[in-house]
C-alpha cells in the first residue's frame, strides 16, 4: 500500500515513477513559509502543461520532495494530480540548517517523532492528505550537527512506527556513513532509507557497500549534470550488480513562488525523451528502466 495525495493505492498500481521532483518551492524560509500568500489556482495552471507532458511521455507517478519549510502544499498537489491523472506523492519531515521549523529546532527526539506520527495519522496541515514518505536532509558540508542527528533519529523512529520510507538529502559520502551508523543504532533497516543525491560525489565503493546492505541509492541529478555522468554511474551500478537498489530522477521543476511566473522551470519529461534513448546508445538496455522506474520505486515506497 502507498499513499498518494488522492488516497491509497496498491504498490502494483504505481507504474513508472520519478522518485524526486519538485512542483512548487518557496524561499520564504521556515519562519515565514506558512504565512506566504500565493494564487494556488494560477500555479496549478502554470505547472499543468509540464505535468501533462510528463504523463504523455509515459510517467504515471511523481514523488514531490518539497519539504514543509520549502512550501509543500498538499492541496496544490491534489489539484495537479486530479487534473493530470498522475499519482503524486508528498511527504512529512523537514529540511536542514535554518530551514527547519522552530518546533523541530527546539523539540526533543520524542516530541518530533510524535508530531510526525500524528501528522501521518491525521493528514498534512489539516487537509486529510496522507504522506507517502518522510523527507529529511543532512548538511551539505562538515559533520552532522546535533540538530541533524536529532532529526535523523526522530525520522528513523517515525519510520519504524508508520512504515514510511525516509528520503534523505545527502551530498557527502562522509555524511551518509555517519547517518548509516545512527540508523544501525536506531535499528531501522537500510531498506527504509533512500540516500538522495547519491550521485553528487558518485563514490562507487560507498554506494556499492551501502546498496549491498539494503540502502536505496538515488541517482537524481539527471539533467542537472551532463547526462554522461549518470550514464557512467548507472553502468558501474550494473557492473557491480546493485541495480535492485537504485532509483532515478531529475530533481527538476519547479514553480518558485517568489519569482515572477515561477521563474525558469525545468521540464519533467526529458528523462523519457532524452536520457533513456541516450542510455540505449551507451548500451544500457531499455529493460533496465522497468526495474529503475517501476519495480524499485514500488518496493521502496511500500508501507509495511
Ligand atoms: Zn530536491
Image (cartoon, rainbow, N blue to C red):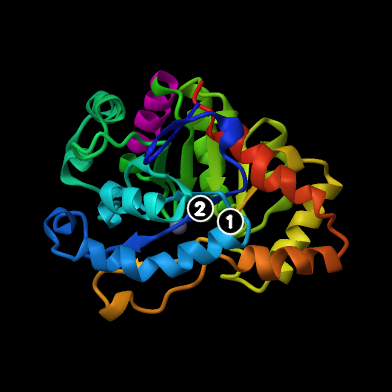
Main secondary structure found in the magenta portion: helix
Q: Where is residue 101 in the image (x, y as percent from the top left)?
A: 21, 47
SS of the residue under disc 2: strand
Residue 266's disc number: none
Q: Is residue 98 above or below residue 5?
A: below
Q: Quadrant of residue 281?
A: bottom right
Extent of the magenta region:
149-161
Ligand 1 image position (quadrant): bottom left
Asked if disc 1 and disc 2 are in contact, CB closer than 8 Å, the reply is: yes
Q: Is residue 229 visible?
A: yes
Task: Residue under label 1, please give it.
Answer: 249
- Residue 159, relative to residue 198: is it above or below? above
Q: How many residues crowd around disc 1 within 10 Å: few (fewer than 14), some, or many (20 or more)? A: many
The residue beneath circle 2 is 20
Q: Quadrant of residue 30?
A: bottom left
Magenta residue check for 22: no
Q: Which residue is drawn at 26% across and 48% down?
A: 75
Q: Where is residue 13 in the image (x, y as percent from the top left)?
A: 58, 35
Q: Residue at x 20, y 40 (%)?
A: 125
Label 2, ligand 1: CB separation under 8 Å = yes
SS for tag 1? loop
- Near-viewer residue (272 or 101): 272
Amino acid at each position: 500500500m502507498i499513499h498518494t495525495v488522492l488516497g491509497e493505492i496498491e504498490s502494483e498500481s504505481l507504474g513508472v515513477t520519478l522518485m524526486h521532483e519538485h512542483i512548487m518551492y518557496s524561499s520564504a524560509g521556515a519562519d515565514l513559509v506558512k504565512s506566504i500568500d500565493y494564487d494556488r489556482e494560477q500555479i496549478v495552471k502554470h505547472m499543468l502543461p509540464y505535468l501533462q507532458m510528463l504523463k504523455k511521455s509515459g510517467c504515471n507517478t511523481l514523488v514531490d520532495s518539497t519539504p514543509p519549510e520549502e512550501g509543500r502544499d498538499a492541496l496544490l498537489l491534489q489539484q495537479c494530480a486530479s487534473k493530470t491523472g498522475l499519482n503524486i506523492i508528498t511527504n512529512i519531515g523537514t529540511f536542514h540548517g535554518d530551514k527547519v521549523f522552530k518546533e523541530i529546532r527546539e523539540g526533543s527526539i520524542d516530541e518530533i517523532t510524535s508530531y510526525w506520527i500524528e501528522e501521518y495519522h491525521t493528514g498534512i496541515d489539516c487537509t486529510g492528505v496522507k504522506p507517502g514518505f518522510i523527507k529529511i536532509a543532512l548538511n551539505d558540508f562538515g559533520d552532522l550537527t546535533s540538530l541533524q542527528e536529532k532529526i535523523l533519529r526522530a525520522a528513523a523512529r517515525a519510520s519504524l512506527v508508520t512504515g514510511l520510507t525516509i528520503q534523505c538529502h545527502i551530498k557527502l559520502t562522509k555524511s551518509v556513513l555517519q547517518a548509516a551508523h545512527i540508523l544501525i543504532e536506531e535499528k531501522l533497516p537500510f531498506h527504509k532509507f533512500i540516500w538522495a543525491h547519491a550521485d553528487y560525489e558518485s563514490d562507487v565503493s560507498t554506494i556499492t557497500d551501502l546498496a549491498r546492505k539494503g540502502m536505496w541509492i538515488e541517482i537524481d541529478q539527471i539533467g542537472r549534470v551532463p547526462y554522461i555522468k549518470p550514464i557512467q554511474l548507472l553502468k558501474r551500478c550494473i557492473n557491480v550488480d546493485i541495480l535492485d537498489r537504485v532509483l532515478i530522477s531529475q530533481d527538476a521543476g519547479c514553480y518558485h513562488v517568489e519569482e515572477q511566473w515561477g521563474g525558469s522551470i525545468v521540464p519533467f519529461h526529458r528523462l523519457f525523451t532524452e536520457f533513456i534513448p541516450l542510455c540505449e546508445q551507451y548500451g544500457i538496455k531499455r529493460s533496465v528502466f522497468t526495474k529503475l522506474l517501476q519495480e524499485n520505486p514500488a518496493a521502496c515506497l511500500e508501507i509495511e
